[in-house]
Image: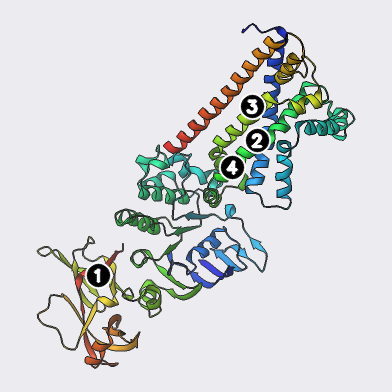
Amino acid sequence: MLTVDLRHRLGAFTLDVRFQSEGRLTALFGRSGSGKTSIVNLVAGLTRPDEGVIAVDGATLVDTRNRIFVPKHRRRVGYVFQEGRLFPHLSVRRNLLYGRWFSSVREKRIAVDQVVELLGLGHLLARGPASLSGGEKQRVAIGRALLSDPRLLLMDEPLASLDELRKAEILPYIERLRDEMGIPVLYVSHAIAEVTRLATTVVLLSEGRVLAVGAPADVLSGSEMVPIVGAGEAGTLLEARVAALDATFGLSTLQTQAGKLIVPRVAAGIGSTMRVFIRASDVMLSQSRPDGISALNVLAGRIVDLAEESRTVVDATLDCGGQRLLARITRKSAIALKLAPDTPIFAIIKSVALEQGERR
Amino acid sequence: MLGLTEEELTAVRLSLRVALWATAASLPFGVLVALLLARGRFWGKTLLNGVVHLPLILPPVVTGYVLLLLFGRKGPIGAFLAEQFDIVFAFRWTGAALACAVMGFPLMVRAMRLSIEAVDQRLEQAAGTLGAHPAWVFLTITLPLAVPGIIAGMILSFAKAMGEFGATITFVSNIPGETQTLPSAIYTFTQVPGGDAGALRLTLISVVVSMGALLVSELMARQAERRLAAT
């Protein structure tokens, strides 16, 4: 259990956050400047808060009222920085083992071999940091943090400096880490795809405040998301199960609460669960079941709520079989279709618009 | 060997001994002060910086005289050290080493300070989050990464010690075999008729030793840099 309850001033910026999480991977999600990294630095002990409490699994790291401030080298909080920060004068092996000098013998719950295998570092051990690719550096940084036997692992946008290919290379390692190591992770990101794929709990931040805390499906689909991610990026997160595979066309059928979705073939086998994210701007609305169009996914539902975002744009919240779905349409269309709460409606989703986050 | 006389050889040997001791003895203090100036945040930092740099600006004679006042037989520090530890500086080669160490100290600290400042503090933070106590962070991260500058500082201090004249002669005089270092010997030669040849020979040695020291420092710094770049 991670408890964070902080008030801290940084120049003109004020951080005032309170949340608790039992999740295996808690994502701090928000725009840059929302205070994500400040929180992580406070948890790591790099900065001292003006006021507040930080506790991990019953161990109090900070409690200003009781004058407790555990210095960073005694917190046992692993930190994976955005830029890796590997020690340039040490080999990969000695980088990995650095934290081990300082953890007492009986605390070593994590074996070196296990981490080397988990992160695929075997062939890199003798090399120096300068010769590694960005993705390799980040994997070493993750391993180094793990091997210091942390009770909590902090990851501050560990993928932000990498290109898409490298990101795709590291994501499975982070998933394995989350599922196999038994160390809670506090993960900073402003990328909705990463959060969709990795998080078990999401803390939504804006301007130093917590807007929402909860399961990814609830938080990422909530209306609080709209001002955070901006026009076109807000949407709905759906839990899905792979129901069928179509080899002829290379398509997979996913069963969600809202109905069936047909997507380009996913790697996961039949029966496995995954998450999909549907952008509000990728949803079209129709009064009748459309006929003769190329889109494969049509979900039946009814209007629950209409929010006028501006003179031109309306955000419509739908209910499809008990599942909320967000659609962004023009105000002109909303008037033309005479949309109102309780209107039956069909949502049309282009299959390519699905973001896939595979889950084990 | 170059046809040096016994007297000249003695001066060369003494100078080397004085310079090595001056450099070695001031090294720990140099690293400590450089660290304080580079990373410390405390009241009186500017004052410390000023005091360290003072020998660079003051006339060497003044520095030598201050040393004489403080470390002489009757000086407060000199009397204490002589009584408690039987360490005497006045008119001994140890005094020459002290004078050289003090004169070379600003150069040593300056080079080391710059290289410690150049070490990425984010690496030190990372080491801290991995459980390293600040003292360990310094020994395992900051110091190894600052090695080129530390070597440079040592060499500068050594070269300065080889050439120090004013403070040394003021503090410990010019006693052959005890405090007559290379520059003092050259000075003596220029004061006596027929000393030109000796002065010239010692001058050549002085140039060679100084150039050698600079070359070695250059090589070592480059090697350290290459090691960092390769890793």
Percent position of residue A31, x then y: 42, 69
Distance from disc 1 to disc 3, alpha carbons, whole Å, reads: 70 Å
Colour scheme: rainbow
Location of residue A319 with respect to A168 vertically, above or below? below
The quadrant in which the N terminus of chain B is found is top right
**What's the residue type where badge 3 is placed?**
Ala
Letter of the chain that mark 2 sits on in the rendering: B
Quarter residue A9 falls in: bottom right
Q: Amino acid at mark 4?
A: Leu
Given residues B102 and B56, the one toward you in this image is: B56
**Label 3 crowd (10 A; few <14 / some 14-19 / many >=20):** many
The numbered disc on residue A354 is 1
Give me the chain letter of mark 4.
Answer: B
The amino acid at mark 2 is Leu
Residue to which mark 2 is pinned: B107
C-alpha separation, residue under disc 2 versus residue under disc 4: 11 Å
The answer to whether marks 1 and 3 mark residues whose Cβ atoms lie closer than 8 Å is no
Question: On the rendered structure, is B215 left or right of B168?
Answer: left
Pointer 4 residue:
B114
Q: Chain of mark 3?
A: B
Say left or right for A163 vs A99: left
Vertical side of A46 occupied by A202: above or below: below
2 and 1 marks in contact (CB < 8 Å): no
Please check whether the numbered discs 1 and 3 fall on a single chain.
Answer: no
